[in-house]
């Protein structure tokens, strides 16, 4: 195995993940048909046969939707629980969000939700679909494989697709929803989400994809829309294409859905979820270069999730690398699991490369240039801490060890490059504020350096005293005279 190629170059990852997901769907259908059959098995089998008989192009378009991966993963886990397999924390949250008393009840609800894919197929293929049993669901509902979503509040009962329209019952009224037709403001609407295309990259701005039970996204999250956010996204993609063409190539292959939220909403700035490959949320307002860096950050989270389909990174007999929130991370105030640390180290390498290449091109001016210099000084020090934390605590598989050593070599090189660029720990700390404006970081009226903010974070958040070596490194860096 060529670890460097797998980490940075391989584009077949995304097709392999799709094929694995499609094979998992076949396995789910076979498992559902076995005795004892779960509730609502007959309806699911009939819907599955419709999707399985679809034209390959139409099936691929529907099943490449991020929600398809989420659905099949939940189905596999819930079916396994019938044979005694334990549910993950995520799956337990999913059952709770469905209001299910037990996994069997959750499975019945989950199998009914397969109807959304047959509805998407009807729209993609331009064919009528009549559901034998209406699909009762909460709104909003994104329709897989399309840019369409049924928006509104409360519940609707979806009967099928007729001549490109969605047949629903809402509040006792039968309604035929068309995307171009006006609908009452207080009722369900069929909306076409905007798309942004730059080169080979095409993304749908569809926040409704993320409104899935158990995913943790609040339904009342304020989402930005309109022409200006679309223009911001397009500009960020053009910047990405110019300064990190490899990342842009992967973005075009891997990312299809983006939601733009207001920066002050929620307790996160950007977010990817392993259960929704090909989709992420990011915040506006933002400087276009910072937004491009966010795109890289979330893209490579998606990419590492895809690499993980190749095999586990951590030994099963060690600590819980996924849910064991035990370790200091220089990127978070709370303790993090080893899996989260590995992700952070990995995604910040291409982010660093983007900042380095754009800095060398001399395209930044004023306070943004100061912020970029902050990042060039900050990220290598954070990478050093993250790598050391993983060396101290992780028990890697053979695959995980090979990938980690390649990541560690790349991380070490960033320190030398930052020094060449004059980005040292004495650089002024400059952050991007919630208003989308760059601002120097002060404490009691005194400007702070990158090293001072890193050291303050470590002293405040390393509650287990894991990083005394790194604290000494930062203190030594601050003691050196500035360049």
Image (cartoon, rainbow, N blue to C red):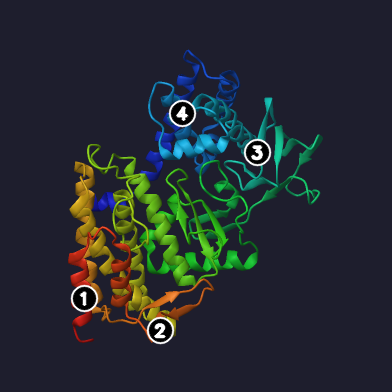
- Location of mark 4 (residue): 78
CA distance for labels 3 and 4: 29 Å
CA distance for labels 1 and 3: 61 Å
- Location of mark 3 (residue): 123
CA distance for labels 4 and 1: 50 Å
Observer-side mark, 2 or 3, equals 2
Q: Which of marks 2 and 3 is nearer the N terminus?
A: 3
Q: In which quarter of the image is residue 166?
A: top right
Question: Around disc 1, counting alpha carbons within 10 Å, would you say few (fewer than 14), some (14 to 19), or many (20 or more)?
Answer: some
CA distance for labels 1 and 2: 21 Å
Q: Is residue 163 visible?
A: no
x and y, in percent, of residue 145 in the image: 57, 42
- Location of mark 1 (residue): 475
Residue 322 shown left or right of residue 270 in the figure: left
Observer-side mark, 1 or 3, equals 1
Q: Earlier in the sequence, mark 1 or mark 2?
A: 2
């Amino acid at each position: 195995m060529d670890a460097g190629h797998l980490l940075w170059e391989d584009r077949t990852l995304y097709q392999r993940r799709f094929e694995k997901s499609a094979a998992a769907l076949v396995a789910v259908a076979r498992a559902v048909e076995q005795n004892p059959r779960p509730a609502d098995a007959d309806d699911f089998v009939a819907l599955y046969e419709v999707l399985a008989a679809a034209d390959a192009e139409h099936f691929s378009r529907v099943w490449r939707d991020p929600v398809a991966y989420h659905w099949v993963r939940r189905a596999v886990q819930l079916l396994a629980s019938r044979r005694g397999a334990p549910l993950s924390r995520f799956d337990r949250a999913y059952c709770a969000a469905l209001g299910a008393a037990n996994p069997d009840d959750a499975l019945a609800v989950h199998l009914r939700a397969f109807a959304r894919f047959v509805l998407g197929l009807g729209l993609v293929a331009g064919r009528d679909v009549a559901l034998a049993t209406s699909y009762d669901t909460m709104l909003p509902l994104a329709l897989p494989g399309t840019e369409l979503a049924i928006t509104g509040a409360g519940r609707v009962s979806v009967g099928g697709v007729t001549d490109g329209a969605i047949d629903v019952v809402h509040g006792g009224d039968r309604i035929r929803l068309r995307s171009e037709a006006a609908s009452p403001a207080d009722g369900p609407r069929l909306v076409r989400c905007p798309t942004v295309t730059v080169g080979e990259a095409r993304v749908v701005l569809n926040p409704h994809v993320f409104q899935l039970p158990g995913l943790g996204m609040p339904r009342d999250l304020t989402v930005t829309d309109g022409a200006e956010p679309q223009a911001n996204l397009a500009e960020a993609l053009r910047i990405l294409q110019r300064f990190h063409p490899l990342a842009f190539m992967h973005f075009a292959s891997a990312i299809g859905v983006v939601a733009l939220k207001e920066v002050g909403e929620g307790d996160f700035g950007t977010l990817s979820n392993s259960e929704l490959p090909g989709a992420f949320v990011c915040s506006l307002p933002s400087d276009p270069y910072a937004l491009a860096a966010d795109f890289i950050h979330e893209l490579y989270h998606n990419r590492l999730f895809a690499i993980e389909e190749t095999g586990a990174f951590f030994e099963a007999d060690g600590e819980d690398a996924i849910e064991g929130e035990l370790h200091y991370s220089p990127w978070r105030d709370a303790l993090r699991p080893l899996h989260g640390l590995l992700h952070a180290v990995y995604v910040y390498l291409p982010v660093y490369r983007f900042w380095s290449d754009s800095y060398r091109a001399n395209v930044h001016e004023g306070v943004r240039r100061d912020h970029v210099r902050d990042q060039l000084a900050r990220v290598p020090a954070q990478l050093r801490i993250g790598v050391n934390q993983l060396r101290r605590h992780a028990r890697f598989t053979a695959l995980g060890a090979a990938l980690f050593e390649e990541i560690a070599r790349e991380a070490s090189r960033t320190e030398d490059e930052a020094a060449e660029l004059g980005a040292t720990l004495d650089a002024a700390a400059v952050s991007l504020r919630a208003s989308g404006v760059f601002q120097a970081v002060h404490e009691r009226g005194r400007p702070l350096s990158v090293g001072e903010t890193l050291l303050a974070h470590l002293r405040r958040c390393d509650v287990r005293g894991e990083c005394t070596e790194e604290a000494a490194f930062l203190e030594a860096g601050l003691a050196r005279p500035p360049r």
